[in-house]
Amino acid sequence: MLSILLMAVDQQFQQLQRIRGMLAFVTYPLQALAEAPVSLARWISEVTASHNELLDENRHLHNENLKARAELQQLESLRAENLRLRNLLDASYKVGDRILIAELSAVDLDPYRQQVMINKGSSSGVFVGQPVLDANAVMGQVVQTTPFSATVLLITDPSHSIPVQVLRNGLRTIAVGTGRINELSLPYLPTNSDIRVDDKLVTSGLGGKFPPGYPVATVTRVDRSPDNAFARIIATPTAHLDRSREVLLVWSVPSKPAIPDEEVPEQDSDATQPDSFGEGSP
């Protein structure tokens, strides 16, 4: 009865969050001690790796680095071109997002929850609702923090949904988790929607949680039945939810405020006035 009372108080009034944080601070050394054998085994495996395996891995990483540098050069060129076009359109340009690299420390084995734990917490500035990515795409968002760790709800969890849009045509919808690690559902699109297999889905930025433009998933199945008002659409997450070890925590950088228009001096009523447009922030 005491346990039920404490759970009810915590659910309604959120009074035990501070105590939970203090307990997490006390149990952190035990958690680090429990993870020590895994870290030791990984260190021994790396030390005992053969010389040829290290050479092959080094050669592979070198080739991947060359490809990444070539793609980065193209990306910088595209960013510069995008900046020039936005300046011409008097639009605001966002420089980028601040990120923090974290590492997975545990995986929730509950078959009804898709959650992982990372080794960064509120002491590093992590906050509830913060977007989490891997090297490929969006993974999920932070749902609980302690001083030295945080719990991340993956986008495939049945209770998670994320606003997305089709990269090809800008069609907006919601991607909902199905409970399967490699599957998302798009349940709110009518049967006549312009969406196809292999369409790329990216974050739309609506809702204020996820910054716009980050990859989310690829459409793999579209079933249109005349008996149903909505199409059955399945997508595969782009992020490696079952393999990624390192993740990125994202802070969105706010865009600069618009520069107010300069006051136009009064002219004679019979003077011809040209069309004018206010200047926006770069």
Image (cartoon, rainbow, N blue to C red):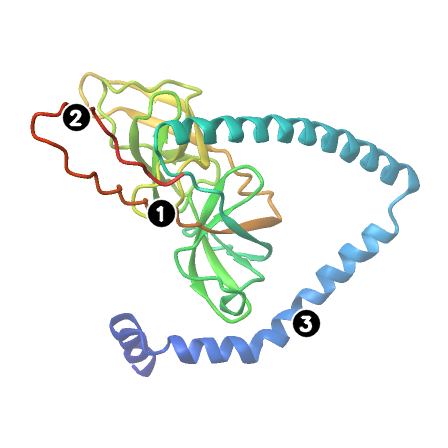
Mark earlier in primary sequence (3, 1) = 3
Q: Quadrant of residue 39?
A: bottom right
Q: Amino acid at mark 3?
A: Leu
Image quadrant containing the N terminus: bottom left
The relative height of residue 3 versus residue 117 in the rendered view (above or below) is: below
The relative height of residue 46 versus residue 28 in the rendered view (above or below) is: above
Disc 3 from disc 1: Cα separation: 32 Å
Q: Nearer the viewer, residue 251 or 132?
A: 251
Q: Nearer the viewer, residue 75 or 90?
A: 90
List x then y, in percent, for residue 173. Answer: 29, 33
Mark earlier in primary sequence (1, 2) = 1
Residue drawn 55% across the image and 44% down it: 134
Residue drawn 69% across the image and 31% down it: 69
Q: Is residue 189 left or right of residue 71?
A: left
List x then y, in percent, for residue 131. Answer: 44, 50
Say which residue label 1 marks. 160
Q: Amino acid at mark 2?
A: Gln
Say which residue label 2 marks. 273
The relative height of residue 206 versus residue 250 in the rendered view (above or below) is: above
| Element carrying mark 3 | helix
Q: Is residue 144 left or right of residue 116?
A: left
Q: Amino acid at mark 1?
A: His
Residue drawn 34% across the image and 33% down it: 90
Say which residue label 3 marks. 33
Residue farthest to the left, as pictured: 269
